[in-house]
Image: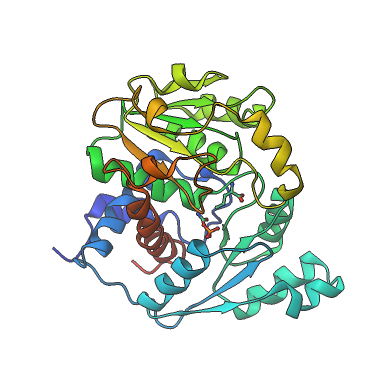
Amino acid sequence: MDTVSQGVARELSLLKGKHFVSSADFTSQQIQSLFNLSTQLKSQQRRIDLGNRVLGLIFSKASTRTRVSFQVAMARLGGQIIDLGVQSTQISRGESLKDTSRVLSRYCDALAIRTHSHQELIDYANWSSIPVINALTDLEHPCQALADFLTLKENFGELKGLTLSYVGDGNNVANSLMICGAILGVNIRIACPLGFEPNSLLIDKARLLASPNSIIEISNDPFEIVKGANAIYTDVWASMGQEKEQQERQMAFEGFTLDKKLFAEADAEAIVLHCLPAHRGEEISDEVMESKSSRIFDQAENRLHVQQALLAALLGGL
Ligand code: CP
Ligand code: NVA
């Protein structure tokens, strides 16, 4: 079969022209439909040609996976990207965001933005007449969460009722994971050192959006939180922009390393996830990262497939 089902096509057609700034932006059916299309694209059952559309990238932080996966996704869709290095644009000389966003809307078909301030991303979206995609802010990383749950679905089939435990910093990755998981009916258990829990407004939002029976639990005890879980996830202790806090955080996160001893508390069939880049020996041991339970590189690959599906839907190429 080289077409998506009518139901999936209908759900995805609702995404045409939309922004994707938060994991809260899409419904469970829309996310599942994106997974369905991602799987078809991944298995090469389906090809989509968008006809030379252009995605502008505005990245003011480093990136390997997000930048390259968006670039390859656009190439596979018959389009291209323009990498708008912030330093070489007038943004670096203070041109206003509202002018930049309106001008780029006249040239490009979509924008993927990686920046510190989540509000800045929202401002871009408010002034843009083309879809704006969150390629990571200090608050959320929704494209990552899509790839994470696609990986979970590939491993377990049904997502509803699974338990994903996240151990580490309650950061952008944890926030999006929590919201997306709640919408999809996954139980999300998060263990952070005291004071490093996810944003409380986002915890409330996740609970509000949660599918019936999906439980969001926040704790300061990593051993208790990973018990019996189907997947254990971690991320760096100091995110981009927090480099000066590295030493202080290393002390605060003592006991939160995802190592063999902690992983042994999970379900016997549990998988290991990490968004990458990893600091081996800090948030995750080399042994766990290289173990047969690791799906970390499948997860990285899935960034490409799910973003290709996302672009096709936002650009109305179905
Ligand atoms: N996981 C992720 O977003 O990686 P990059 O920072 O390399 O894009
Ligand atoms: N939390 C990390 C994720 C990197 C993909 C950061 O923001 O640096």
Quarter of image, res 3: bottom left
- Closer to us: 181 or 245: 245
Residue 186 can be seen in this image: no
- Closer to us: 187 or 290: 290
Q: Residue placed at 65% from the left, 44% from the top?
A: 238
The image quadrant where one finds the N terminus is bottom left
Structure colour scheme: rainbow
- Closer to us: 11 or 311: 311
Q: Residue placed at 32% from the left, 44% from the top?
A: 294
Quarter of image, res 124: bottom right
Picture coordinates of residue 21, whole percent (x, y): 58, 51
Residue 3 can be seen in this image: yes
Residue 287 is left or right of residue 84, and the answer is left
| Residue 304, placed above or below residue 290 | below
Q: Residue placed at 75% from the left, 75% from the top?
A: 87
- As drawn, the residue found furthest toward the bottom would be 52
Q: Residue placed at 35% from the left, 22% from the top?
A: 265
- As drawn, the residue found furthest toward the right would be 94
